[in-house]
Each structure stands twice: as structure tokens, then as C-alpha cells.
Amino acid sequence: TIKLEEEALKEALARSATTNVSTSIFPDGLTREEKSGIGATTGEGQPLFSITIQRCQHHHAELAATERAIRFIKWEVMRMPRSSEVFNIFADSQSALRILGKPRQ
């Protein structure tokens, strides 16, 4: 579901407050001049990763950050396969979310 950033942040904070087995992840991508970067934090503001990548369009950096967040979740699930933790990704790039919502078009 695509939600406004404010609404998504409120939902993430509410989910964090109601359970200790839910992790909110906020990926982000950035492109400036000759560099692009990707990163993500938890809902509590704990950094998960921050990486400089080859320069690309902004929405591609956003997609790369989301993909890296998914890989982080996969690694966590493989590390603790019986965990009941729920992961929620909150992305703020409308163009990246539209691409994810309609692949191969």
C-alpha cells in the first residue's frame, strides 16, 4: 500500500510501540553531482547501512536502497529462521514505489 510519508511514519511508530517483534526499516537513496548513495535506518533511528554507489538516477538509488533493505531482512531471517519478527519497509519515493507496483511495464 502506498501511503503519504507522514501517515507511514505514524504507522511505523505505532507498530513499534505495540510489539517488540516488529522492525520498521526506512531505506533512502540520494544522487548529487557525481555520486549516489543508499542507506537505511530502523524506526528507532539505528543505521543499518550507508553505501556510496555508482552515480544513477535518483529513483534508481531509491530502488537500490529498498533492494538492499530486502537483502538485510533475508539475511536476518536466515540467521534466525524460527523468529516471529515482522519487518516493515517504509519507502518515501513515489516513483520507486510505482515501479515496484507495476513491474515490467
Image: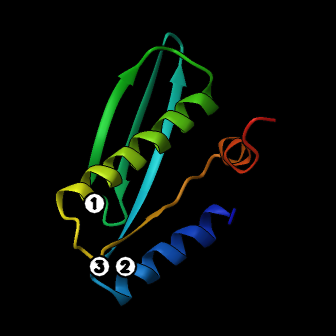
Image coords of residue 41 (percent x, y): 35, 53
Q: Residue furthest bottom?
A: 18
20 shown above or below 90: below
Residue picked out by circle 1 = 77
Mark pair 3, 2: CA separation:
8 Å
- Label 1 neighbourhood size at 10 Å, few (<14), some (14-19), many (20+)? some
> Tag 3, which secondary structure?
loop
The residue sitting at 23% across, 65% down in the picture is: 81
Q: Amino acid at mark 2?
A: Ser
Quadrant location of the N terminus in the rendered image: bottom right
Quadrant location of the C terminus in the rendered image: top right
- Viewer-side residue, 59 vs 100: 100
Residue picked out by circle 3 = 21
- Label 3 neighbourhood size at 10 Å, few (<14), some (14-19), many (20+)? few
> Tag 2, which secondary structure?
helix
Residue picked out by circle 2 = 16
> Tag 1, which secondary structure?
helix
- Viewer-side residue, 87 vs 5: 87
Q: Earlier in the sequence, mark 3 or mark 2?
A: 2
- Viewer-side residue, 73 vs 45: 73
Q: Amino acid at mark 1?
A: Val
Q: Amino acid at mark 3?
A: Val
What label does residue 13 carry, if any? none
Q: Earlier in the sequence, mark 2 or mark 1?
A: 2
Mark pair 1, 3: CA separation:
13 Å
